[in-house]
Image (tube, helix red, strand yellow):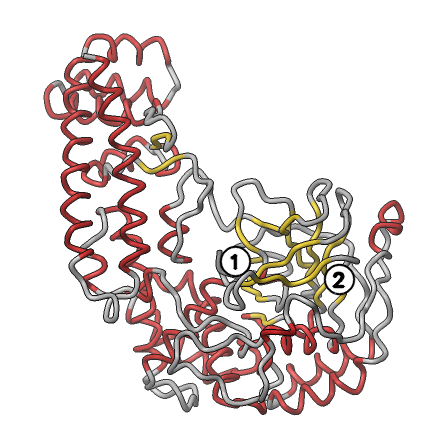
Amino acid sequence: SFGFLDCIAVNNSSLPIVHSTLTLLYSKAITTMRFSSAIVAAAIGICATSISAFTPRGAVARSSTVSSLTQQSPQPLTQLNQYASATAGAINLADEYAQRDVYSMEEFATQYGLQKAPGVELYSDDGSDYQLITQQPIGAGQTCLYVPSDIVISSEKAYQEFGNEIQQAEQVLVQIDQGTAARLPLFRLMVKILAEYDQGENSAFFPWLNSLPRVYYNGVSMTNDCFSCLPPYAGWLASTEKANYDSFVTALRQGYVQLQSVNDDTVTQWAYNVALTRFQEVWSPQRAKLIAPMADMLNHSAEPNCEITFDDMGNCEVTAMYDIQPGTPLTISYGDPTNPTPIFAQFGFLPADCATLFCKAMHLEPYIKELGIEFKDLLIQTETGEIAPKVWDLFLYEILVNNDPGAAEQYYVAVKCNDEATKQQYQDQYFQYTLDSMKQHVYSILSDVDTLTAKAQNYDLSTHPRVPVIVAHNNLVRDTFTMTAALLEQMG
């Protein structure tokens, strides 16, 4: 799986104290004026050697666990050294498959105060996709990784850094689409990434930027042809993400924020994807999105063994949720494992361990909203084809609304009040109608998926490289709904 696919959980935790001189230097640089990254890097570099080993604030009971982290000197890792770039250079986005220099990124992060538990290292099978694994046992509650706030990219810091420029751009963005007001932290991350990209090797974050993938398979990277090959729910989520990106770019191209690369579609899409796939949101001391280099290399699992937290100073800590055995990847959750389609739209892959799918009843969205049902509750089991109870509620309600408004009102109240006895009475009375409606929906989805997949497979991979991901999504839908159809046939 891809090392760039990150989504992380947040809560407060005791973390090490960052050297006070370093914190003061960085804080003044950000709050007093817009320093170049090169200047900030120099200031941080002066104090980097003064950062001590992991020392917890309070949390005495955890001190033996936390103190096991050590700040290691940069050194080649067996699994990485063979992939390290021979020479430095500008970030090459023209070649989507350009080598990722993750070794230099780790060296950069270590010099700035990154600390790892013994045995935690980067690993790759092919020199392209990376993840964090542990070669030594890690106990529940133990800190696996610590990333100091000085190298954590923050939307709030970006907002302070760009000041009036970004405020004007945000005003334009909200005028374009009021819905983007909730996504301003993501916009700020994108601006920061573009600004650092423009500085090339002069950017303090160049080693991190040069370690990132160039190719993405999510909704932002898809074309209208791609959207037309997806079922309605997946197509809607993917195209919505692309529309949000378009609004961001339109606002940036008004010129309020001085960015050299803002008119380069390849660069802007890459910057948006980096922000979109690597951030985590926090709500204290204020709402912000943050990206922690190295911590953003953890892969996804429906049953994660780690969680990532940030303290109020922005320091990042990766903690084991339970005992982790040697040779095990360190994983987190990128989203709700019961509904993998949003993960597909945001990150561009389908979790191999997803157990459920959305029932694809987008044509019933008004009734979904009316009943107050969430998409994550309208599920079908991928291993058995079984249908969740709320799906039956939804299809029966639609039948009643169109045929017996009085009964629909009573059923609505029963659903809202969790009156199972009344619900069962209506379900028994209208079972055959509901079953027929469900069959019609399932067979319609199967027919549509076959048509959409055939259409996708006719595209040239050189111009539509996301086709394999789309086909994989459609095949999962087809296989699941085929089992569902068999179950429905057994019912009558």
**Badges 1 and 2: C-beta atoms under 8 Å apart?**
no
Q: Which mark is residue 6?
A: 1
Task: Tell me which numbered mark, 1 or 2, is placed earlier along the sequence.
Answer: 1
Q: Disc 1 marks which amino acid?
A: Asp
Position of residue 82 measured from the top left corner of the image (x, y, whole percent): 62, 74
Q: Which residue is depicted at the point 86% across and 78% down?
A: 50
C-alpha distance separating marks 1 and 2: 19 Å
Q: Quadrant of residue 242?
A: bottom left
Mark 1: give few (<14), some (14-19) or many (20+) Cα within 10 Å.
many
Q: Is residue 458 left or right of residue 465?
A: left
What is the quadrant of the C terminus in the image? top left
Residue 316's x, y, as percent?
68, 61
Numbered disc 1: secondary structure:
loop
Measured as percent of width and height from the top left, residue 95 is found at 39, 80
Give the label, 1 or 2, closer to the camera.
2
Q: Residue at x 48, y 88 (%)?
A: 198
Identify residue for label 2: 116
